[in-house]
Amino acid sequence: MAVLERIAYEQLNARQKENYNFQKLAAVLADYGFNCLRLTDDWKGADFIACHVDGQTFLRVQLKGRLSFDRKYQGKNIHMAFPDGGHFYLYPHDDVLEKALVLGLMKGTDSWESEGAYHFPKLSQALLDLLRPYRLECVPYPQDSDK
């Protein structure tokens, strides 16, 4: 077998980055009891469905490269996910949007006011505080008990 070499994320194109982020997030969500099913057509605004082992919890998830809000996702029961600082965040779009609007984080921006979408290039302390409950922790891979 050939020796595997790590790839440089920065050298991936946009589609490759989306695939990479999906695989990474799916691995983290497995720690929370979810199996992720990739969709090919952005069904009802979702890039994938996360199905919980309880058989009753299903999340429609839109994967982004950074914290994002968009009016087109309002009222669709969409969760947004993005990587930042070695972690993933998974948040209910409408709930966190409402909190961000109360804090005035997008107020007066052309992007939000005119186009109805806003993407934060970096997370301020206020955003980190807002997102803290939605930060996913990656747990170490479980060891076999037979060893």
Image (cartoon, grey):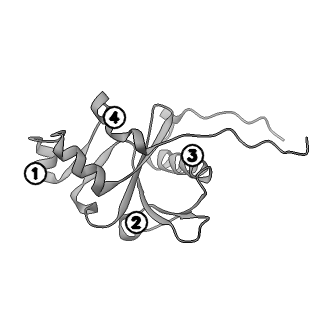
Q: Tell me if 2 is positioned left or right of 60 in this view.
A: right
**Can the viewer see residue 86?**
yes
**Which-is-in-front pick, marks 4 and 1?**
4
Number of other residues with Cα within 10 Å of mark 4, as a class: few under 14, some 14 to 19, many 20 or more:
few
Q: Residue 4: give x, y in percent of width and height.
A: 73, 36
Q: Which mark is residue 114?
A: 1
Q: Residue 135: give x, y in percent of width and height.
A: 45, 41
Q: Which mark is residue 129?
A: 4
**Mark 4 vs 1, N-terminal side:** 1
Q: Tell me if 123 is positioned left or right of 22 in this view.
A: left
**Mark 1 vs 2, N-terminal side:** 2
The amino acid marked with disc number 3 is Lys
Which quarter shows the C terminus? Answer: top right
| Distance from the alpha carbon under mark 2 to that under mark 3 | 19 Å
Mark 4 residue element:
helix
The residue closer to the viewer here, 53 or 1, is 53
